[in-house]
Amino acid sequence: MSADLSQGFETLASRAEPALKAAVLAQALPYLRQYAGATILVKYGGHAMGAGHASAGDPFAADVVLLQQVGIKPIVVHGGGPQIGQMLERLGIRSRFVDGLRVTDRATMEIVEMVLSGTINKQLVAAINAAGGCAIGLSGKDGELIRARKLRRDGDDLGFVGEPERVDGRVLATFRASDLIPVIAPVGVGADGATYNINADTVAGAVAAAVNAKRFLLLTDVAGVLDADRRLIPELTAAEARRLVADGTISGGMIPKVETCLEAVEGGVEAAVILDGRVPHAILLELFTEGAGTLIRRG
């Protein structure tokens, strides 16, 4: 290829790129209108974080800021199971699990709170702020945002493991009226003042219902719900999802995620989506294109 022809291709490519960007923005306009002013609850899982921590330049943080800039009200709930496990291992503390829940004694609870509220939460807040947003870190203990009750499994005492008893949406309404982006660690407080470790998916679904979110995005490390041939199912009604659980198509760790989504939509969320948070810009792909995961509606 001659130098002149090569240069011509480069010129065409440079001219096409802005046009392509403009076309993408134009195609996103109907979605932008659909979500303008809406609350979007995003659950960012410990597995979806990939490297295990959030940092400046994180695409997730930039995407959250973009949502706010186009008039959407994002709320982030994060997990941190892998990071908690790493810290406990470093400290020589062995973990025991019952139905996927970490048995949490008082010493372990201190580590859990330190990792969730003191490390991951502040990393996410810093990453969002570095991307141009204004985030504020919370746990369920702040303002008694999440009142927890002790959780048991088949008579087993799990220690300081809880489940949401009540989510005070008034606390988050204060932030909705401002430009602050709440980032919530899944730690709750009991009626007796005790601190409880709560499954982050469960917290995210409960918060989404409490604020009547338009979308609950559950970011994890799988593409979504798969059918019997391992193909992604783009959309399900609640009845269809229950039928797939009953016949075994939905199994293993996907069952509690689907159940969390069902509880959220039954609690008033318009739709919940399970999608792969490891995919760059997964949030934007889900909200501003034809979708990227499995969307679950009430009916």
Image: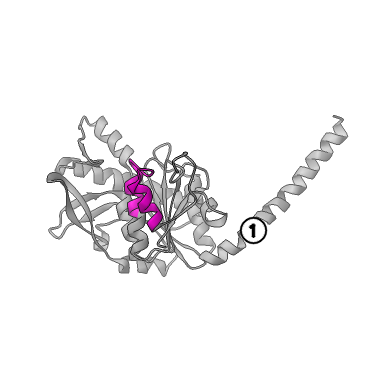
The residue positioned 12% from the left and 46% from the top of the image is 155
Residue 1 visible in the snapshot: yes
Q: How is the image coloured?
A: one colour
- Return the x and y of residue 241 as percentages of the image width and height: 39, 52
* Residue under numbered circle 1: 27
Compared to 43, does 29 lie above or below? below
Mark 1 closeness class: few <14, some 14–19, many ≥20 residues within 10 Å? few
Magenta run includes residue 245: yes
Left or right, residue 54 beside residue 25: left
- Return the x and y of residue 121 as percentages of the image width and height: 35, 49
Residue 121 visible in the snapshot: no
| Residues in magenta, as a range | 239-260
Q: Nearer the viewer, residue 33 or 116?
A: 33
Q: Which amino acid, mark 1?
A: Gln
Residue 82 lies in quadrant: top left
Compared to 101, does 235 lie above or below? below
- Return the x and y of residue 290 as percentages of the image width and height: 56, 54
